[in-house]
Image (tube, rainbow, N blue to C red):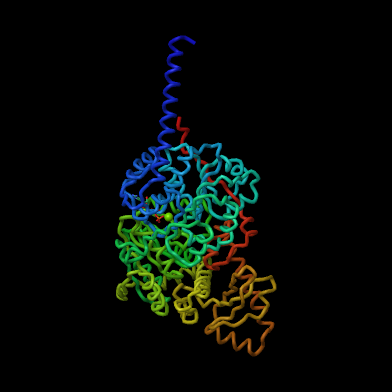
Amino acid sequence: MSIQRRKKHNRSNERRKLKREEALKELEVLEKNCQNLPLNLEYESFKELPLSLLTQQGLQQSNYIEMTKIQRKAIPLALRGRDVLGAAKTGSGKTLAFLIPVIESLYRKSWTQLDGLGALVIAPTRELAIQIFEVLRKIGRKHSLSAGLVIGGKNVDVEQERINRMNILICTPGRLLQHMDQTANFKCDNIQVLVLDEADRILDLGFEKTINAIIENLPKERQTLMFSATQTKSVKDLARLSLEDPEYVSIIEDSEHSTPISLSQHYLVCELPQKLDILFSFIKSHLQAKVLVFLSSCKQVRFVFETFCKLHPGAPLLHLHGKQKQTKRLEIFNKFSSMKHAYLFATDIAARGLDFPAVDWVVQVDAPENAETYIHRVGRTARYDASGHALLFLLTSEEQGMKAALDKKKVPIDKIKVKSSKTISIQKQLQSLCFKDPEIKYLGQKAFVSYIRSIYLQSDKSIFKVDELPIEEFAATLGLPGTPKIKFVKAQSKNATRQKPKKVPGYSSSDEDEGNSVKILEMNSNTLPNLDVQEKKRKEANPKSKLDKMFNRKNMSVLTDHYKKLVDQEADNITSEEELITLKRANHELSDELKQPVFFYAVYSIISSIN
Ligand code: ADP
Ligand code: MG
């Protein structure tokens, strides 16, 4: 080596050494500052906190300067290593409240690739997991930590190979547990931080057992950060199980209202048969807006979307529901995010944690199951410091119960009147669509049945009264030529349809099946006015008549042929999350979970090493 080259070599060695020493010193200082961080001070900006330079840069470059309330309260505690149970309404900035402590914890421990998995973030849905991942990419871009997503899908091999190289994993519960069980070299015994985001939703979706099983696999010596938009009893139960001597930080109880002040909230009272007319009229009078429209089931979403597209209201329409393939859902989500004006018809799947930028309106055509879901849904607008509007459609029978539930949750909502002179009736157009297009008719029939089912399955009977629904009129306003016949039956075996259904008010029904789901058997009789009475009379006369059996069989096949065709276009082999809401609070059997394929969505190495 020439003298010059050697000198150069030595100089760069020196520089590297110096850099390493500086980095070590920074770590030492950071660690000390975190341990001694005074908790009685009000920190306002991220700069005031003992965060690594790399994180400070990442935050700055993403334009995160001032902290939100929940961040001010939760981050200092988490930096000191405490377990945190955080409650704050949606849109308040919970993601950074846990991601910053996660990155900092690993950074201060000089975490490297060799240390393996150091932090787990569990989120209820794939969409939410992807969003968290994106935020992590943004603020962690200067770090040398690696992060990956495990959110279900197909390619197990690729993922099994890569999963062990990750320092931070963002996962949905089912997929994570599958890994713990199936991936031979998947190690969790070095986990430093566990995050449970939207814990209330995770539990709502029936993942309680899964979460418990996951927690059992994790080392006891760890930090746990748990966040949720609402504090239910089951959230508190889970907190007792997974957190150690936690600090409870709540922004909800501090504020007078549980929804943002910049959100104007109204409800209108109508009858079921008017709903689509009012929705259509709303669209016509709000063409220049970005609106999220909630409906109770994916069949409703499909019917309203397909028919409204044909009626050309003059605004771009999109739809999002749990029966769509994951890639399709993401595509629609991105499209809606990037559009200035558009209507997105969605089921609650869209309400869970998604951060749609600048949604002007949240319109709830079908009432939410309870006040908590209401808060989640309207949380899609007026995020951070933007303003927004929320409109809730209530049936006369739902008004009193829902208003009481919302009052109890401190939701300030005012009643508005619908001007019937301004309402456009689309019943005739729907009738003609149904008449011309059998697919639309079958969609309408499915939408009808699934709506009635969703009301039947609602747990809060003080709000939802299935026997008060004007079902024939409702069917007519969907454009259907008759009222589909509905029967709630036990879905145990193929022969189950032959069993005599048990009676419930207004409808014949039976108990839930093994998977605690109620399946509904229907339909397609065009001429069954006053079906409850007719059905009752018929059964009294002959409890298990030939007609009974034949009727069931015949209608089964009529339905399956056409319906299969429709559903197959979009069906996915992934369990629809939406189904889980409708059929509700079933605690997923672990074995079912394991049947779901796993797909390692992406691997992202945030950047190369410090020195
Ligand atoms: P939550 O999880 O509580 O629903 P998010 O973490 O998704 O809320 O944040 C809501 C929105 O606020 C996001 O668009 C996010 O980028 C923005 N945000 C969060 N924290 C800050 C901050 N400190 N400064 C500016 N914007 C922020
Ligand atoms: Mg969130």
Q: Is residue 582 above or below residue 22?
A: below
Q: Is residue 142 above or below residue 263?
A: above
Residue under the point 56% across and 45% down = 190
Foreground residue among 593 and 473 = 593
Location of residue 363 by image quarter: bottom left
Outermost residue toward the top in this view: 2
Q: Relative to 414, is 501 on the left or the right? A: right
Q: Nearer the viewer, residue 137 or 71?
A: 71
Left or right: 366 in relation to 564:
left
Total numbered labels:
0
- Where residue 500 appears, as percent x and y from the top left, is 66, 81
The C terminus - image quarter: top left
- Residue 136 at what x, y percent from top left? 44, 45
Residue 98 to residue 590: above or below = above
On the image, the x and y values in percent for residue 263 come to 31, 63
Q: Nearer the viewer, residue 37 or 233?
A: 37
Q: Is residue 541 above or below residue 556?
A: below
Q: Position of residue 61 (x, y in %)?
A: 35, 40
